[in-house]
Amino acid sequence: MHRIIANVPSRKRDIYYIEVLGKTLDILDVFGRSDRRRLSLQEISAVTKLNKNTVFRILYTLAEHGYILKEKHSYGLGPKFGELSDIRLHRRDLLSTASLHLDALRDQFGETVNLGVLDNGSIRYVDVRESQARMRLAERVGASDPLHSTALGKAHLAYLSSDDVKALMKQAGMPKHTPRTLTTLSSLLAELQTVRQLGYAVDREESMLGAFCVAVPILDSQGLPLAAISVSGPTIRFDESKLPAVSQALLKSAKEIQKKLGHS
């Protein structure tokens, strides 16, 4: 039987103590100490000894900012919360470890190579190696793109639970960027199943006409996505014919990065 383990300490209430912030941190502590990914409002209220209305309002606010994901009558930690914990611990190691692989992929295929992470319902580019070709695809570091229409996004989504995918799509929406964009949850979930089977995701002019992109995830030891790497280029020279070679090279690079980061 699953148990919720939490020990909410008593604190001295002085003039510097912010009561509502303390209650928020108590609620987050419940998720950190529990052996379950999702908890009900009643369970959180019982452990924290806070009334349900207070707990609901705090959870609602956290969900609005991406720190909590609500699905029906249960709550789980959201991608924003996970990213914050990863930033300090892993981001610097990720960038330095991936750097040589990004350069090698760019040189091998002559196309732009991207490194992206999940950031509050979108893909955030944290490193880019631009193609040297006059006509090329490129994003600036710090820019973001939707999850549902990009290879980097689908490479992330494929390794999250279906509940988390649904919650992210509800949060961010599924706008149509081109006639090829997936705009229904059912079509996206079917696509993500294919991504898991193949190990890589493809953007076939779904985010921009004339653009083709292939991406693979970089997974942690639990099989959850830390980041994703992609190769992207204009369809006049980069298309399905390059898919076998590019996907294998990306899978090899991702595996080596995972190993160097300590994730077998």
Image: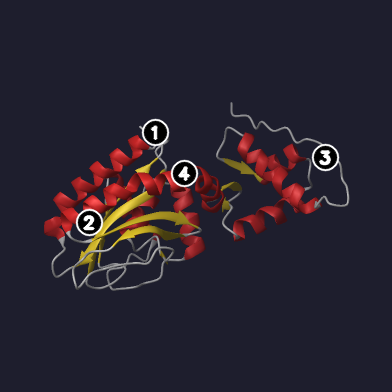
Which residue in the protein does label 1 denote? 262
Check residue 106 in the rendering and tell me which mark sits there, or answer none.
Answer: 2
The CA span between labels 1 and 4 is 11 Å
Please tell me whether mark 3 or mark 4 is closer to you in this view: 4
Q: Is residue 36 above or below residue 228?
A: above
The residue sitting at 43% across, 35% down in the picture is 222
Identified at 24% across, 48% down, the residue is 250
The residue lying toward the viewer, choosing from 200 and 4, is 200
Identify the mark nearer the N-term, 2 or 1. 2
- Residue furthest out toward the left: 241
Task: Give SS at disc 1.
Answer: loop
**Would you say the residues marked 3 and 2 are in contact, meaning their CB atoms lie under 8 Å apart?**
no
Which amino acid is tagged 4? His
Q: Position of residue 2 (x, y in %)?
A: 59, 29
Q: Residue at x 57, y 35 (%)?
A: 36
Foreground: disc 3 or disc 2? 2
Identity, as a three-letter code, of the amino acid under mark 1:
Gly
Measured as percent of width and height from the top left, residue 106 is found at 22, 56
Name the colour scheme.
secondary structure
Residue 11 is tagged as: 3
